[in-house]
Image (tube, rainbow, N blue to C red):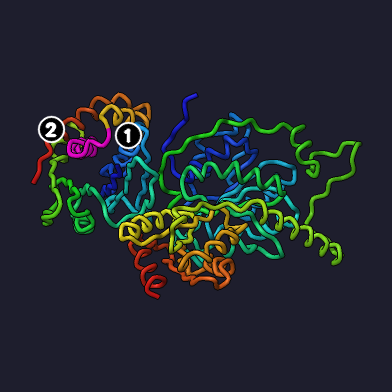
């Protein structure tokens, strides 16, 4: 069969992927730079074809709680927003993590803090990876670096969410969201039938038959000892995720003397910087994070024994760099370079930063 | 082959759609493509630009400071992007509204009177296709048949009746572009 190729924006690819992966519902509220997600869904009208619900809620808080309700019924539900909107959703995200429910959340990050700017940023790394709401929980965080990955990570995200009964976040930014690239579309998968859902999600509130007791979805337990037991169970789950779900890409690391560590659009900028540096005879490789949580600590620690230094490149004041430092355990120098507030570093600036902070440093 | 292009002009000149047609043409012949608009709180009449990259290989950064080709359609864009063309690169411009003509000696400069030609052809909206034709004459990186396929993909079906006019505009651009 001929490949189905399209030129799409990252935000449109996410929306198309949601339809094609057989999602049951999207609940959202518009905010730049990700409004194309809901616009595209409203144009495609999947509620007339696959039966997928697309709803503009009255607020971000309402949208995430609709996701909570749909997820409790074992449905494939997602929401999307950009930084200030994601902050509003954090209470709901914490409850969903506490209730061990699967869902997909897209954050097309913009400059902050506060309302900030509408330009691209990666300054929500801490919020995505360290538990943005209250309580001891983690999200699985995927970082697409191309429009194709925006498409692919929707299905992957839902798979991981249901496998671990845990919310999954796709952390993107205004570059990947607004850019158009070639996308190979996957086939349309049918939505699951109620009997499939009952089988796949025996925990879901799908209506109580006489054959089983009540399924109760809650994140509340007033007995501290029980809550601790539940916390330990979550920790065990996150440990398994750390062991099994680390994803990254090594680019030219075999002969590299210096490593750029980056994710998402920063990784794309680094690829250009790497070409410029290699043209000067400087052997540079890239570790591109695909999962931000779980973090690929092991490979970075292994590389630390072989290379002369790491430069963490991110559009933030220095967030991911802390995890790089923890992974490298002082075996090699680690420095940070980033632009802030929606400004995008040029590949030439990355070259200069590596030369000044690591090679010359 | 990797061709990194900036197309810059006023909002409403068809800068973004020209970039999209070019990107779709590359896609139609199996190449890797990226289309990255400048985005922000812009308004009609303000400047608008788009980076288009067409390559045989995986595309790295969609954000660039040096370009193989700059297609420049107003004075602000000339001021900003003339210096960002790589040495031996190409600069194509429409002299309409350009007061300070490009000065660099280390790049190849081409001119196309697209505003005038589009008006002569009776439809100012095909201005951007005249420009595209001029560009493709100098750098035939995509085949004309693939441009037509790209056009079909990027414009709504109700406007497909305008395809022959668009093709004429491309041919006009190819015919009238001059080296300076």
Identity of the residue drawn at 11% across and 56% down: B103
A306 relative position to A136: left or right: left
Mark 2 Cα-neighbour bin, 10 Å: few <14, some 14–19, many ≥20: some
**Element class at badge 1:** helix
Mark 1 Cα-neighbour bin, 10 Å: few <14, some 14–19, many ≥20: many
A141 relative position to A349: left or right: right
Q: Where is B149 relative to A208, above or below?
A: above
Q: Position of residue A310 (x, y in %)?
A: 47, 66
The residue closer to the viewer here, A299 or A160, is A299
Q: Which mark is residue B25?
A: 1
Q: Position of residue B12 (x, y in %)?
A: 28, 45
Identity of the residue drawn at 30% across and 29% down: B146
Q: Mark 2 lies on which chain?
A: B
In space, the residues marked 2 and 1 are separated at their CA atoms by 20 Å
Whether residue B168 appears in this view of the structure is yes
Quadrant of image for the C terminus of chain A: bottom left
The residue closer to the viewer here, A344 or A111, is A344
CB under 8 Å between discs 2 and 1? no
Q: Position of residue A46 (x, y in %)?
A: 57, 33
Instruction: Single out the residue that lies furthest toward the left.
Output: B180
Mark count? 2
Mark 2 vs mark 1: which is more N-terminal? Answer: 1
Magenta part, dominant SS: helix
Q: What stretch is highlighted in magenta?
A: B126-142
Identity of the residue drawn at 40% across and 44% down: B58
Q: Which chain carries label 1?
A: B
**Element class at badge 2:** helix
A186 relative position to A100: left or right: left
Tag 2 residue: B175
Q: Is residue A283 magenta?
A: no
A206 relative position to B155: left or right: right
Whether residue B41 appears in this view of the structure is no
């Amino acid at each position: 069969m001929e490949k189905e190729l399209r030129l799409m924006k990252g935000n449109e690819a996410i929306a198309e992927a949601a339809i094609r992966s057989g999602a049951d519902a999207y609940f959202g509220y518009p905010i730049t730079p990700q409004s194309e997600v809901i616009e595209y869904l409203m144009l495609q009208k999947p509620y007339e074809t696959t039966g997928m619900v697309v709803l503009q809620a009255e607020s971000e808080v309402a949208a995430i709680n609709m996701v909570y309700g749909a997820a409790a019924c074992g449905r494939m539900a997602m929401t999307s927003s950009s930084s200030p909107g994601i902050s509003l959703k954090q209470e709901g995200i914490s409850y969903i993590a506490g209730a061990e429910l699967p869902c997909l959340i897209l954050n097309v990050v913009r400059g902050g803090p506060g309302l900030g700017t509408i330009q691209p940023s990666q300054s929500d790394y801490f919020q995505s990876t360290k538990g943005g709401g209250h309580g001891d929980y983690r999200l699985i965080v995927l970082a697409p670096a191309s429009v194709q990955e925006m498409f692919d990570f929707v299905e992957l995200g839902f798979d991981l969410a249901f496998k671990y009964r845990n919310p999954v976040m796709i952390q993107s930014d205004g570059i990947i969201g607004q850019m158009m690239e070639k996308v190979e579309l996957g086939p349309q998968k049918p939505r699951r039938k109620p009997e499939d859902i009952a089988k796949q999600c025996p925990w879901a509130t799908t209506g109580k038959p006489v054959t089983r007791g009540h399924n109760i979805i809650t994140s509340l337990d007033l007995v501290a000892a029980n809550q601790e037991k539940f916390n330990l169970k979550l920790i065990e789950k996150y440990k398994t995720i750390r062991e099994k779900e680390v994803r990254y890409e090594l680019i030219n690391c075999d002969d590299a003397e210096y490593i750029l560590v980056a994710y998402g659009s920063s990784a794309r900028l680094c690829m250009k910087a790497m070409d410029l540096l290699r043209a000067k005879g400087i052997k540079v490789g890239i570790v591109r994070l695909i999962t931000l949580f779980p973090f690929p600590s092991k490979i970075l620690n292994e590389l630390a024994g072989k290379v002369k230094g790491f430069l963490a490149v991110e559009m933030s004041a220095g967030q991911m760099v802390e995890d790089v430092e923890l992974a490298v355990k002082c075996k090699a120098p680690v420095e940070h370079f980033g632009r802030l507030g929606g400004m995008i570093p040029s590949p030439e600036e990355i070259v200069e930063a590596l030369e000044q902070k690591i090679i010359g440093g | 082959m990797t061709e990194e292009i900036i197309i810059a002009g006023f909002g409403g000149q068809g800068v973004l759609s020209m970039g999209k047609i070019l990107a779709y043409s590359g896609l139609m012949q199996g190449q890797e493509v990226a289309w990255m608009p400048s985005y922000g709180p812009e308004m009609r009449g303000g400047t608008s630009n788009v980076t288009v990259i067409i390559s045989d290989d995986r595309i790295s950064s969609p954000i660039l400071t040096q370009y193989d080709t700059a297609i420049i359609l107003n004075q602000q864009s000339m001021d900003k992007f003339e210096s960002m063309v790589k040495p031996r690169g190409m600069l194509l411009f429409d002299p309409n509204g350009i007061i300070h003509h490009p000065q660099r000696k280390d790049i190849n400069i081409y001119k196309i009177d697209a505003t005038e030609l589009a008006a002569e052809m009776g439809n100012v909206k095909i201005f951007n296709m005249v420009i595209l034709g001029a560009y493709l004459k100098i750098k035939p990186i995509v085949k004309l048949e693939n441009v037509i396929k790209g056009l079909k993909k990027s414009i709504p079906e109700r406007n497909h009746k305008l395809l022959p006019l668009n093709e004429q505009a491309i041919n006009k651009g190819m015919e009238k572009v001059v080296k300076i």
